Image (cartoon, rainbow, N blue to C red):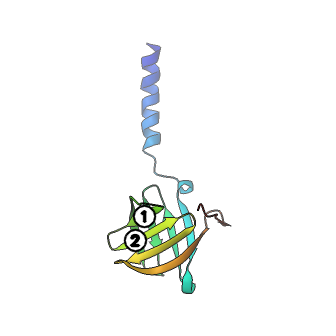
Amino acid sequence: MKTIKLAAFLLPAVVAIASLPASAEQQQVYRYQCNNGKTFEAEYSSETAQLKLGENETLTLKQTPAASGVRYTDDRTTLFTKGNQAFIEVENQRVFDGCVAQDTTNQRRIRALW
């Protein structure tokens, strides 16, 4: 009987916690410095990357399988990352190349994993 009462109390609490949105701490924002002085920002959540490519251009890309590193795409624009390095392709043409990330969430430089 005690087990049933405990389960009846805990179940709503677990459901409420599970339905909470991701906290800001789970999202990471990086500023990338690329070749030719180009820059962009990426905000990562568990399954997406939101790119800010300029003052008026923001894209949301979904994570997809990658042979190595991490790949995000909307089938037109693709972001590839590995460690602290990245590049962006638009329709299979590299438009941001040689990019290196800085963590703007914690204001510290991140280290490469490769």
In the displayed orientation, state which residue is furthest to the right. Answer: 108
In the rendered image of this protein, does residue 102 appear above or below residue 95?
above
- Mark number displayed over residue 71: 1
Q: Quadrant of the C terminus?
A: bottom right
* Contact check, label 1 and label 2, Cβ < 8 Å: yes
In the displayed orientation, state which residue is furthest to the top. Answer: 1
Q: Position of residue 59 (x, y in %)?
A: 40, 72
Name the residue rendered at 55%, 83% in the picture.
35
Amino acid type at image mark 2: Thr
Classify residue 12 by image quadrant.
Answer: top left
In the rendered image of this protein, does residue 108 appear above or below residue 20?
below
Name the residue beneath numbered marker 2: 78
Residue toward you, 75 or 42: 75
In the rendered image of this protein, does residue 21 appear above or below residue 40?
above
In the rendered image of this protein, does residue 46 appear above or below residue 85?
above
Q: Position of residue 65 (x, y in %)?
A: 38, 58
In the displayed orientation, state which residue is furthest to the left. Answer: 75
Q: Classify residue 110 as left or right of residue 1.
A: right
In the displayed orientation, state which residue is furthest to the bottom. Answer: 36
- Mark number displayed over residue 63: none
The kind of secondary structure element at disc 1 is: strand
Q: CA distance from mark 1 to mark 2?
A: 7 Å
Classify residue 63 by image quadrant.
Answer: bottom left
Q: Quadrant of the N terminus?
A: top left
Name the residue rendered at 50%, 79% in the picture.
97
The kind of secondary structure element at disc 2 is: strand
Choose the circle earlier in sequence order: 1 or 2: 1
How many tags in the picture?
A: 2
Q: Position of residue 89 (x, y in %)?
A: 41, 76
Residue toward you, 1 or 22: 22
Amino acid type at image mark 1: Arg
